[in-house]
Image: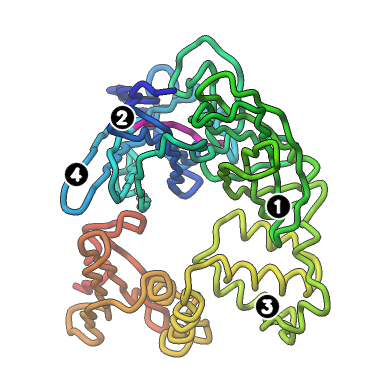
Amino acid sequence: MGHSIRLAALVGLLVLGVDLLYASAPTDSLKLRVDCARYRGDEANLYVEVYYSFPQRSLTYKQDTVGLKGALDLVVVVTKGDSTAFASRWLVPHSVKDSSGFQKGLNLVGVTGVPLEAGDYILKVIGRDVNNLARADSVKYRLPIRMLDSTKVLISDLELATSIRQTEKKGPFYKNTLEVIPNVDGIFSEDQRCYVYAELYHMLAGTDRSDLKVKTVVYDAVGKEIISREKPRKRVNESNVLVDNIVVGKLRTGTYSVILAVLDTSGKVLASTGKKFYVYNSTLGIDSTLVASNAALLANEYATMSEEDIDKEFEWARYAAMDEEKDQYKELKGVGAKRKFLSDWWRRRPLGFKEEYLQRVGYANAALRIMGREGYKTDRGRVYIVYGPPDDYDRHPSDPDSRPYEVWSYNSIQGGVIFAFVLRQSGGDYELVHSTHRNELHDENWMRFAVTR
C-alpha cells in the first residue's frame, strides 16, 4: 500500500494588498506543534508524514481588499549526519473576512511527506510569522528509519486525528480513500472523538491464513485499562487500513494511551502501535487517577508538602508548562490531587530536568531578587530559568552616559543569541528590551533605552 509523494500540503502564495489599512496583532503565542508517522513506501524508502499545527490567532494579519490575511513561512529540513536528506520551504496562508472570524483554540493544520531510506535522521521544522518575522518557533525531532521486515505482520506508526471520513476528493489529507485530519498536539475536548489511523502490512506473510484480531485498548495515566475491544480481520489482502475512534466525552480530564494490536487466533500479539493523547473534559473534571491514595502519597516526595507549597512549586514551573497543563492545574481540587499532578508532571520530563530547573529557580530567587520581587518573576530570572546561565555577561552598572544595562550571550542556542536588559527606572528592575532569539522581544534600536543623553 504505497503512498504518492505529497510534498506541498496547504501550499500557496500569499499576496499582500498594496494599501494596508491596519494589522491585527496576534493574541496567542506562536507555538508550532509537530508530529510524524512512518509508513511503508517503496523498496528503498519509508514514507514519513510530517504533521504540523499552530494557533490561528498566533499570526499577524494585514488588511487587504477582501479581508485580513496572514501566513506562516514554514521550513522542513531533514538531516543525516552532516548532510541534508530533504529540505522544503513554503507559505501556509490563512485569511478571514474580519476579526469575527478568529476562533479561540482553533489550530491551523497541515501535512507534508518525505521519502527516506534507512538511517538515523534529525527532523527540524521552523515557522515564522510572515508579517512579523521576529515571531518564530522551531521544533526538532530524532527520526530513526528502519526498513520493514517483509516476513512478518507489521503495523505502521499510529496517527491521531480529529476526523476520518470516506472521500473521493484527493486533498492534502487524503490517503487510501480516506480524509484523515491530524490532531497534532493530541489534545481532545469532550465534544470530540479521538480518531486513530494506522496501516497493517504483510498480512499474507508465511502460510497461516486464519483470521486475525485487531484490538483497541485505552489506558489511563497510571496504566489502568479502561477501554478494550476486538474486531476480526480476514487475511484477504496483503495490507489493510486500521481505523477506530474513542468517545472522549466519557473520559475524565487527563492523559491516556491508545494501543492498536494485531493478534492471531491463539491471542498472541503479532504487532502493535500506540500513542499518548490528552483529554480536557469540562463536564467530568479531572481523571480520578490524579487523586492519589493515602498509601501512594506516603511514598510520594510531595506527601508532606502543604497546598501552598505545592502551588508555589508549580508556579515556579510555569515557564516549562504547556497552556493546557496550566489550565488543568487550575481545575484541580484539594491538595491530594495537586500532589499527584505535580509528581506526575515532573516525572514526564527528561531525567535530571527537575533538579536542574529548580536549581535555576533557586539561583534566580537568590541572585536576581529586586525590591521584594522574587527573582523568578523578573525578566532576568525568567531568561535564566528558561535558557540557563549565559556563556558571557556584558555588564554596565555605572557607565557615565547610560543607564545600567546587561547583555547576556548564549553561544549554543540558534547559532548564538543575546538578551539585553536595561534598568530603565531608578529603583526598578532590569527589563528585557531586546533579544536575537526568534521567540523573544526584538528591537534592534534597544540602546535608546540605555543612553541618557
Between label 3 and label 2, give the one nearer the viewer: 2
Q: Earlier in the sequence, mark 2 or mark 1?
A: 2
Instruction: Measure the C-alpha gap from mark 4 to mark 1.
Output: 39 Å
Q: Is residue 363 above or below residue 279?
A: below
* Residue type at tag 1: Tyr
Q: Earlier in the sequence, mark 4 or mark 1?
A: 4
Instruction: Measure the C-alpha gap from mark 2 to mark 1.
Output: 36 Å
* Residue type at tag 3: Ile
Q: Secondary structure at mark 1?
A: strand
Residue designated by label 2 = 43
- Mark carried by residue 310: 3
Between label 2 and label 4, give the one nearer the viewer: 2
Q: Label 4: few (<14), some or many (≥20) within 10 Å?
A: few
Asked which quadrant contains residue 384, the reply is bottom left
Name the residue rendered at 24%, 47% in the picture: 79
* Residue type at tag 4: Thr
Residue 324: x and y in percent read 61, 54
Q: Label 3: few (<14), some or many (≥20) within 10 Å?
A: some
Q: Secondary structure at mark 3?
A: helix
Q: Secondary structure at mark 4?
A: strand
Between label 4 and label 1, give the one nearer the viewer: 1
Q: Is residue 111 magenta?
A: yes
- Mark carried by residue 219: 1
Q: Earlier in the sequence, mark 2 or mark 4?
A: 2
Q: Is residue 188 left or right of residue 361?
A: right
Name the residue rendered at 52%, 67% in the picture: 349
Residue 85: x and y in percent read 22, 41
Instruction: Measure the C-alpha gap from mark 1 to mark 3.
Output: 27 Å
Q: Is residue 163 above or below residue 104?
A: above
Name the residue rendered at 62%, 58% in the picture: 325
